[in-house]
Image (spheres, rainbow, N blue to C red):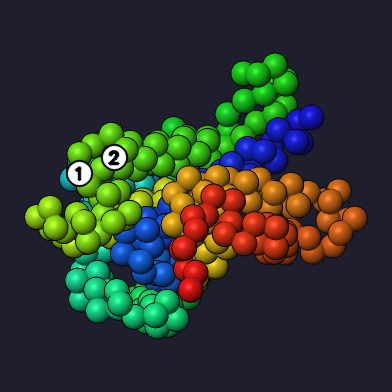
Amino acid sequence: MDAIFLQILNGLDKGGAYALIALGLTLVFGTLGVVNFAHGAIFMIGAFCAVTMEKILTLSVKVKDTSVTFFDAYKETPYLELWFGKTGSAIIDWVVPISIVVSIPVMLGLGILMERSLIRFFYKRSHAEQILVTFGLAIVLQELVKSFFGANPIPVSAPDIVAGSAAIGSWIGLGDAVVYPWWRLIYLLFSVVIISAVFSFLNFTTWGMVVRAGMADRATVELLGIDIERRFTIVFGLAAVVAGLAGVMYTPVLPPDYHQGMDFLVLSFVVVVVGGMGSLRGAVAAGFLLGILQSFSSMTEVKSIIPGIDQIIIYLVAVIILLTRPRGLMGRRGVMES
């Protein structure tokens, strides 16, 4: 029972990352009709926003080590610690939450820049051309990150206050032996909050309702005198913010590297197809579903029966669902159909 509960938590945690990226992908496709293969690269850039912020906050100078008395010795000490003491150390410790605040305008600006400088020229092109150009953009972005940060993963730590594990077993009566990392629980909660915020924005605000109307019938909305193209540009930026925040928060879970975006993109695009192209609810539901299935398939007991099942389970489920429901779980008629 304990193992099953932990695997469900693992699946929800991983599914949260899939759902956030898939939500951004679906939002862009639903509004602009663009299949954006550069969305995973945006997730990766969000993660490297946290890496960059940590490097800035930990800029150091060599200071003489007074604990060594026999000879002169020096140690690297961050400027923030020299200037602000314990407050400076606390700022460095909270680098990930600080990166969230910093990354929001950065990712919004990056998304709008991508849409205005490149994506808008491919609105009326075929999906194949959209995939090619955005895939090429993703490769360019990951190679730029590789040139600046190198090819090796760069770890970023969560704040010390949430660095340990929570005794979740005692919360629900399973005993003190059942523990789970605090940061993974925070990431799961963060995913739910962001997903709820996106749906609330689209369903309960006038701005969001206009966007949904534009997704359903762009021509009619334009005839009403509304600049729907401008709103769609902002939606592209908001989708980039969602993916970027997902990347920032995921850095303590998985040290980012330049190839991280491509790894998550492939899985998240499968999630979008399984959920149904253009369906926001389908993307979220499929993200959590496939995350849980992948978690259970990684159990030793399962892999001993079907070796390698954890590597193919997502694609296997996708094949089964698309054979029985060609539009995905919640796909709409006419989306990507000739």
Q: Are there few (<14), some (14-19), or many (20+) residues within 10 Å of tag 1? A: few
Identify the disc placed on residue 28: none
Identify the residue position indicated by label 2 in the image.
Answer: 201
Name which residue lies at 84% across and 51% down.
Answer: 302
Q: Say which element carries label 2.
A: helix
Measured from the top left, where is residue 326 in percent x and y? Answer: 62, 62
> What is the quadrant of residue 70 in the picture?
bottom left
Residue 156 seen in the figure: no
Identify the residue position indicated by label 1 in the image.
Answer: 207
Measured from the top left, where is residue 218 in percent x and y? Answer: 25, 59
**Is residue 284 left or right of 329 when viewed as pictured?**
left
Name which residue lies at 29% across and 40% down.
Answer: 201
Q: How many numbered discs?
A: 2
Nearer the observer, 167 or 194: 194
**Residue furthest right in the image:** 305
Nearer the observer, 113 or 62: 113
* 100 over 197 or under it: above or below: below
Q: Say which element carries label 1.
A: helix
**Is residue 238 left or right of 263 when viewed as pictured?**
left
**Marks 2 and 1 in Cβ contact (< 8 Å):** yes
Image quarter hosting the N terminus: top right
Q: Which residue type does callout 1 highlight?
A: Trp
Name which residue lies at 27% across and 49% down.
Answer: 213
Measured from the top left, where is residue 329 in percent x and y? Answer: 59, 51
**Is residue 254 left or right of 300 when viewed as pictured?**
left
Q: Are there few (<14), some (14-19), or many (20+) residues within 10 Å of tag 2? A: some
Q: Which residue type does callout 2 highlight?
A: Phe
| Dot 2 or dot 1, earlier in sequence | 2
Measured from the top left, where is residue 323 in percent x and y? Answer: 70, 63
Separation of residues labelled 2 and 1 (CA atoms): 8 Å
